[in-house]
Image: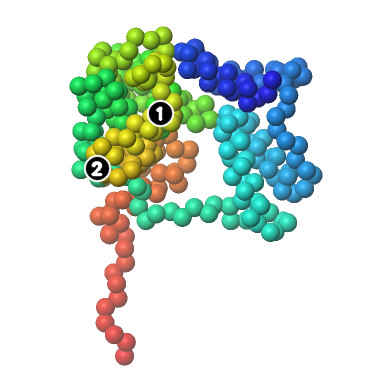
């Protein structure tokens, strides 16, 4: 019995429609470890500066961020690959982030949004499902994993509120837009198959289990190819939601609340799409020659 096995157990429960909160699983792991019934699947780190750094980072991801074992392993692999490329023994102060930011967030234009939604054949159950799932990402900025994990109990139809369960076991309640609610209702009434699974979005073909994060990402990619707008990833729909709010004049603070950002810096990058406002702060180019 290892922590990865326990994580696979949780995923199997979710696929079978059994409620299995991640917090409860973490408590189970702590109990098993304290009782000596859990084999530690984490490799022993050497007593080096790099080894201690990785071990501390992994502990932070597990205890503070509350990430699953699979996510922790992915982050650990990235860090170790980065450290292998560095020839320095002292790893303090290294420029860890090597990502290059684009000039503008990669959101879709209104025309591309229209083409993408029209690529969903809402005469069929899969089309109604895909349309509702993509609207959630476009209008509320939900991630593919959050759409996949959305349950029937997470939607309060009486008050028009949806509960979003995001990263690090974070839970937020957001207003449910009318068009999104109508799209979900259409799928539930005339598309969702009869199944004990409690997740909203399920496979259109047997076995009738909940869509995974990869499944949600796949339906976005397939729709974009049918629409003829190139390969669109699920996270681009989250960017699209932010860009649309910026263009509509929504304050950055409110955008950060909708996207559930942990810091204002994460929201600030979307201000770059408001070209008209950026022109107001640009300094005039000097005109004239030198004497």
User: Which of pointers 2 and 1 lies earlier in the amino acid sequence?
Assistant: 1
Measuring 66% from the left and 21% from the top, which residue is drawn there? 29
Residue receiving disc 2? 228
Q: What is the number of callouts on the image?
A: 2
**Residue at x-position 50% and y-position 31%:** 167
Residue extending farthest right: 47
Residue 106 image position (x, y, % from top left): 35, 47
Vertical relation: 273 (above or below) 232: below
Q: Quadrant of the N terminus?
A: top right
Res 281 → quadrant: bottom left
Q: Residue 193 versus residue 174: which sits nearer the camera?
A: 193
Check disc 1: other Cα within 10 Å, few if <14, some if 14-19, many if 20+.
some
Judging from the image, what secondary structure is the residue with disc 1 in? helix
Relative to residue 185, is residue 4 depicted above or below? below
User: At 29% from the left edge and 30% from the top edge, which residue is drawn?
Assistant: 135
What's the mark number on residue 215? 1
The residue positioned 39% from the left and 16% from the top of the image is 206
- Classify mark 2: residues with Cα within 10 Å, few (<14), some (14-19) or many (20+): few
From this viewpoint, is residue 23 visible? no
Q: Secondary structure at mark 2?
A: loop
Image check: 110 left or right of 175?
left
* Residue 119 x %, y %: 23, 33
């Amino acid at each position: 019995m290892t922590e990865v096995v326990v994580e696979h157990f949780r995923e199997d429960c979710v696929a079978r429609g059994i409620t299995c909160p991640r917090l409860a699983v973490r408590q189970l792991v702590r109990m098993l470890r304290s009782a000596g019934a859990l084999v530690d699947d984490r490799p022993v780190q050497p007593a080096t500066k790099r080894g201690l750094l990785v071990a501390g980072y992994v502990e932070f991801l597990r205890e503070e961020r509350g990430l699953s074992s699979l996510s922790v392993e992915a982050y650990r692999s990235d860090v170790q690959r980065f450290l292998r490329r560095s020839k320095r023994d002292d790893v303090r102060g290294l420029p860890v982030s090597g990502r290059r930011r684009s000039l503008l967030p990669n959101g879709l234009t209104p025309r591309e949004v229209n083409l993408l939604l029209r690529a969903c054949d809402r005469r069929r159950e899969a089309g109604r499902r895909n349309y509702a799932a993509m609207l959630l990402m476009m209008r509320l900025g939900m991630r593919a994993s959050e759409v996949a994990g959305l349950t029937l109990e997470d939607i309060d139809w009486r008050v028009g509120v949806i509960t979003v369960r995001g990263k690090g076991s974070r839970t937020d309640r957001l207003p449910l837009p009318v068009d999104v609610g109508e799209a979900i209702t259409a799928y539930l009434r005339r598309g969702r198959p009869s199944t004990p699974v409690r997740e909203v979005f399920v496979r259109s073909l047997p076995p009738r289990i909940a869509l995974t994060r990869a499944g949600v990402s796949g339906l976005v990619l397939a729709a974009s190819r049918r629409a003829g707008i190139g390969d669109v990833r699920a996270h681009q729909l989250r960017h699209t939601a932010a860009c649309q709010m910026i263009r509509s004049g929504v304050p950055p603070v409110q955008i950060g609340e909708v996207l559930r950002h942990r810091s204002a810096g994460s929201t600030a990058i979307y201000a770059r799409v408001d070209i008209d406002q950026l022109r107001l702060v640009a300094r005039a180019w000097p005109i004239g020659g030198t004497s």
